[in-house]
């Protein structure tokens, strides 16, 4: 499967969002747990959920892009196969019978 710059960029964003969300989860459960109270608690975990959602959205966009590219490549392959077959039929019709 061939990739391009958009695929690489999309995947790096997904990894970035996932690393941030995982870091926030670990920090929130260890170092920051005694300090997170009230509105700070809610904002912190909503931000963590936001980064998780961004990672999931990025993954969905990547799946859609890969599916679209695969579908387009399959259609192109079928078109080439049928064009080649038609070309072969025309060439056989044009050849004189050698007897």
Image (cartoon, rainbow, N blue to C red):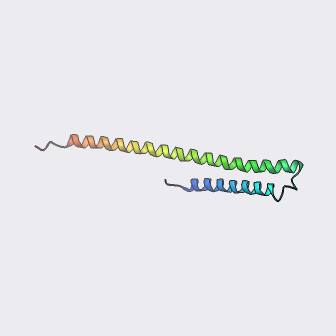
Viewer-side residue, 90 vs 85: 85
Give coordinates of residue 55: x percent, y percent.
67, 50
Q: Which residue is pictured at 27% across the width and 43% down the height?
A: 88
Quarter occupied by the C terminus: top left
Left or right side of 94 for 80: right
Give coordinates of residue 4: x percent, y percent.
54, 55
Give coordinates of residue 31: x percent, y percent.
82, 59
Give coordinates of residue 75: x percent, y percent.
44, 42
The furthest residue to the front = 30
Q: Which residue is pictured at 61% across the width and 53% down the height?
A: 10
Left or right side of 69 for 80: left
Residue 16 vertical placement versus 62 (above, below):
below
Viewer-side residue, 68 vs 41: 41
Q: Which residue is pictured at 49% across the width and 54% down the height?
A: 2
Left or right side of 66 for 46: right
Q: How many marks can you see?
A: 0
The furthest residue to the bottom = 31
The furthest residue to the left = 99
Viewer-side residue, 5 vs 74: 74
Q: Which residue is pictured at 74% across the width and 57% down the height?
A: 23
């Amino acid at each position: 499967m061939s990739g391009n710059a958009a695929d690489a960029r999309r995947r790096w964003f997904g990894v970035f969002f996932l690393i941030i969300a995982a870091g926030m989860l670990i920090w929130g459960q260890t170092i920051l747990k005694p300090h997170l109270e009230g509105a700070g608690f809610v904002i912190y975990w909503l931000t963590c959920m936001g980064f998780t959602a961004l990672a999931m959205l990025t993954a969905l966009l990547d799946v859609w892009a890969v599916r679209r590219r695969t579908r387009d490549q399959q259609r192109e392959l079928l078109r080439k196969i049928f064009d080649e077959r038609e070309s072969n039929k025309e060439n056989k019709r044009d050849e004189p019978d050698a007897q």
